[in-house]
Image (cartoon, helix red, strand yellow):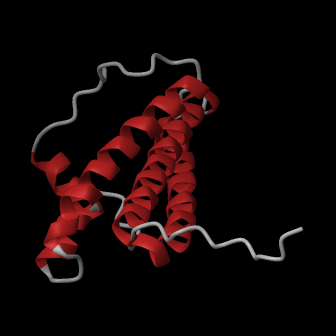
Amino acid sequence: MSTQLAQPAPPVPDLLRRSVAEAVGTGLLLATVVGSGIMAERLAGGQVALALLANTVATGAGLIALILTFGPISGAHLNPAVTLSDAAVGKTRWRDVPAYVLAQIAGALGGVAAAHAMFGEPVFSRSLHERSGGGQMLSEFIAT
């Protein structure tokens, strides 16, 4: 019998680890947002305010959990706009931005697909709601 100890696995490169955290975190966030929206709409019985409240509470709780979970690993940007803003103020290296953004896009697509699949919806489809205009842009800016 050999008495040698098992060698630890080589460390995962830091950018890969952070990018995977961004992909998983973004995927979980989008699955939470989309999934809670679908569920709220189905359970609210046409009461739009109730559906919006349920979606908002679920999203807020999910976002807090994801920030606490992934914040220490990657910063929990979970959004390309946040990554770009973080790089603009010098907290994220510009050379890391492409990996973060690609991971966030992949995670977002995966999260939306997972939420739709869980609720028996088409995995990807066009929205039936028009969302445009200055108010929409302002709300997206403030939310980001």
Measuring from the top left, give residue 50's x and y in whole percent.
55, 43
Task: Report which quarter residue 91 is drawn in.
Answer: bottom left
Side of 38 relative to 97 (left or right): right
Task: Report which quarter residue 15 is drawn in.
Answer: bottom left
- Residue at image coords 38%, 21%: 124
- Residue at image coords 21%, 75%: 86
Picture quarter with the C terminus: bottom left
Task: Report which quarter residue 65 is drawn in.
Answer: bottom right
Determine the residue located farthest toward the right in the rendered image. 1
Tally of numbered tags: 0
- Asked if 58 appears above or below 75 in the picture, the reply is above
Which one is in front, 54 or 78? 78
Which one is in front, 107 or 81? 107
Measuring from the top left, give residue 108's x and y in whole percent.
38, 43
Determine the residue located farthest toward the bottom in the rendered image. 90
- Residue at image coords 40%, 66%: 18
Measuring from the top left, give residue 83's x and y in whole percent.
24, 66
- Residue at image coords 11%, 41%: 133
Side of 84 relative to 13 (left or right): left
- Asked if 74 appears above or below 49 in the picture, the reply is below
Picture quarter with the N terminus: bottom right
Measuring from the top left, give residue 96's x and y in whole percent.
22, 67
Which one is in front, 87 or 29? 87
Determine the residue located farthest toward the front in the rendered image. 1
